[in-house]
Image (tube, rainbow, N blue to C red):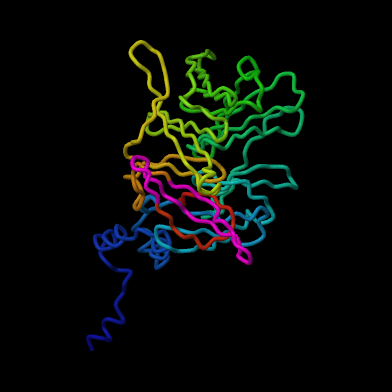
Amino acid sequence: MEAKESLERDWSSLLPELLNLIVRNLTEISDFVRFRAVCMAWRSSTTITDLLPQFPWILECHHFLEDDLRFYSIHFGKTYSIHAAKSLGKWLIGSSINYIKIFDITRQVFSLLNPLKDHEIPIPAYDCGKYPYWIGPWQNRMGVQMICYGHEGCQNPKLVFYHLDENNWSELIIGSDYVNCDISNCNLFYLNGMLFNVLRDTGVTKVMDVSTNTLAYIIPPVEGYSTQGTEYIMDASGDILRVFQYGDPSVDLCQYCFIVHRLDINESGSVCWVEVDNIGNHALFFDMNGGFVLRACDFAGIKRNCIYYLTKMPMRLGETASCSVERIDIETGAREQFPCPLGRPQFWFVPVL
């Protein structure tokens, strides 16, 4: 009789306190989704915000999307296949934190897509009288979508920055007075109202206060500056970091090294880059599309003061392409590698429902 009563128990009538206790232990997104799919009572007992922030997934890169998207979680060791109808027939450009960037070649429209919700947000097009000329806009991915428009031979080039807030875009246009430079010789980053322009040939960084359209700082290059690498300017909870990524030919060109500097402003107002081996409670993530910063304390499984990057594994005869994840401790330089079953160049993606 007791067994029969157990089988006939109405699980939808569990007390809210018990449901909340269960939800707090659902750290993996698929378990959370299954929980909410059990019944209306269980669904109504939770909100999307109850899901704990997820360790970034790895997105398998197929340039032309004609099938389900594939992701891999190194934290849980799971592969996910997600059907996002709005991605089909589009070109995958990369990722941007919680979105993937796609291009509809038929309509000539760039969009951001959350594949978990199949929710697409078209990126506004700034009218420059010609097809937009894109200038490395995606290296900074801290929620600011940076797009540089203009075209070859344009007499009045402009930088146009679009910031996404919920589903609305705010526009910031910077005219040619500041932008009038050799575009191929600079990296541009927009952080918190400041435009950082890193000149590749010299390593000098010019910083403009966008609100006043004036030059705020000129930062000298770091000691031993090299052009054989990639620059990133990133915001780590108010600390401005300069990260230099370069391949190590003595080991393997697929293995990267990183040098981290922090912007230091002394009492006299002079500025410089200071090399650091501690970025506090932060972790850096890099892939072929750029990089971003996360607070390690907000995400289960992320180790603080580390760099996570995706790299291609060297191929031997008869083997298929493969990739791996490497974690570098910034202070000690210790490296740890994690296998990944996905077989193409990949992007980081932070899943959000």
In magenta segment, residue 260: no
Task: In this rendered view, identify the residue nearer to me: 263 or 244.
Answer: 244
Identify the residue at horizontal 49%, vertical 46% (top origin). Answer: 98
Left or right: 245 as drawn, with respect to 147: left
Above or below — where is 219 with respect to 226?
above
Residue 288 in the image: state x and y as whole percent: 56, 45
Question: If the image is split into quadrants, where does the N terminus sit?
Answer: bottom left
For residue 306, which quarter of the picture?
A: top left
Identify the residue at horizontal 57%, vertical 30% (top origin). Answer: 227
Above or below — where is 123 with respect to 157?
below
Task: In this rendered view, identify the residue nearer to me: 77 or 131.
Answer: 77
In the current view of this chain or complex, which residue is farthest to the bottom?
1
Above or below — where is 307 with respect to 313?
above
What is the total number of numbered labels drawn onto the structure image? Answer: 0
Residue 81 in the image: state x and y as whole percent: 54, 63
Left or right: 35 as drawn, with respect to 102: left
In the current view of this chain or complex, which residue is farthest to the left?
2
Above or below — where is 344 with respect to 221?
below
Identify the residue at horizontal 39%, vertical 42% (top origin). Answer: 283
In the current view of this chain or complex, which residue is farthest to the top?
268
Residue 128 in the image: state x and y as whole percent: 72, 27
Task: In this rendered view, identify the residue nearer to me: 22 or 295.
Answer: 295
Q: Which stretch did the figure color magenta?
A: 308-335
In magenta segment, residue 319: yes
